[in-house]
Image (spheres, rainbow, N blue to C red):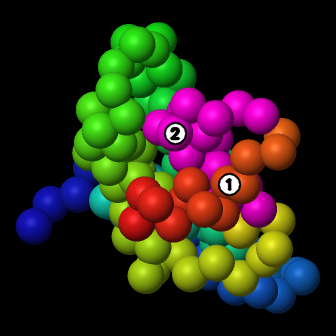
Amino acid sequence: MQFHPAKCNTLPVTRSRRPLQPSYQLHGHTLETVKAVKYLGVTIQGDLCWDDHINNIVSKANKTLGFLRRNLKISSRSVKEQAYKAFVRPILEYASSVWDLHTQKNIDKLETAQRRAARFVCNRYHNTSSVSRMLDSLG
């Protein structure tokens, strides 16, 4: 198998505060060292934190939800629910067993996106509405 050195890079995986900085070469070219890489849709950071990945999927889910809001404004709840389950939820749940949540900050970001989607599906934007009940009704 042949590799193109310009398309290759290295990702040192460590939690050390002062990691070693070895220089790797392929066919006489020094490979670039990166702090994060996207592989199969999952952003992997060298320190094994998932902040970049969570930020990416929350942003993508919010953009998709915005698209659905603009286009399904007057649709029924069942249509909105099907659209949520087909387009938004898979973004939030993709490869979740890999990037298991380990910080409250990341949990809060994902829950905020889910709550926003639940309010859209149920068409309840009042502060007095129980979002947890809405989420339970969505399954």
Give whichever of 96, 4 is nearer the camera: 96
Q: Return the residue found at the far front.
A: 128
Q: Residues within 10 Å of mark 1 (few under 14, many from 20)?
A: many
Number of numbered labels in the structure image: 2
Q: Secondary structure at mark 2?
A: helix
Whole-percent x, y for residue 42 in the image: 44, 61
Q: Return the residue found at the far right.
A: 17
Q: Could you tell whether 32 is left or right of 9 in the image?
A: right
Q: Could you tell whether 51 is left or right of 16 in the image?
A: left
Name the amino acid type tagged 2. Answer: Cys
Mark 1 / mark 2, whichever is N-terminal? 2
Which residue corresponds to mark 1? 131
Whole-percent x, y for residue 127 in the image: 83, 40
Q: Residues within 10 Å of mark 2 (few under 14, many from 20)?
A: some
Q: Secondary structure at mark 1?
A: helix
Residue 11 included in the magenta stretch of the image: no
On screen, 67 above or below 31?
above
Name the residue located 73 percent from the left edge and 46 percent from the top edge: 129
Which residue corresponds to mark 2? 122
Span highlighted in magenta in the image: 108-126
Residue 118 included in the magenta stretch of the image: yes
Whole-percent x, y for residue 139 in the image: 40, 66
Q: Could you tell whether 94 is left or right of 119 in the image?
A: left
Name the residue located 65 percent from the left edge and 63 percent from the top edge: 132
> Which of the 4 image quadrants contains residue 138?
bottom left
> Does residue 37 appear anywhere in the picture?
no
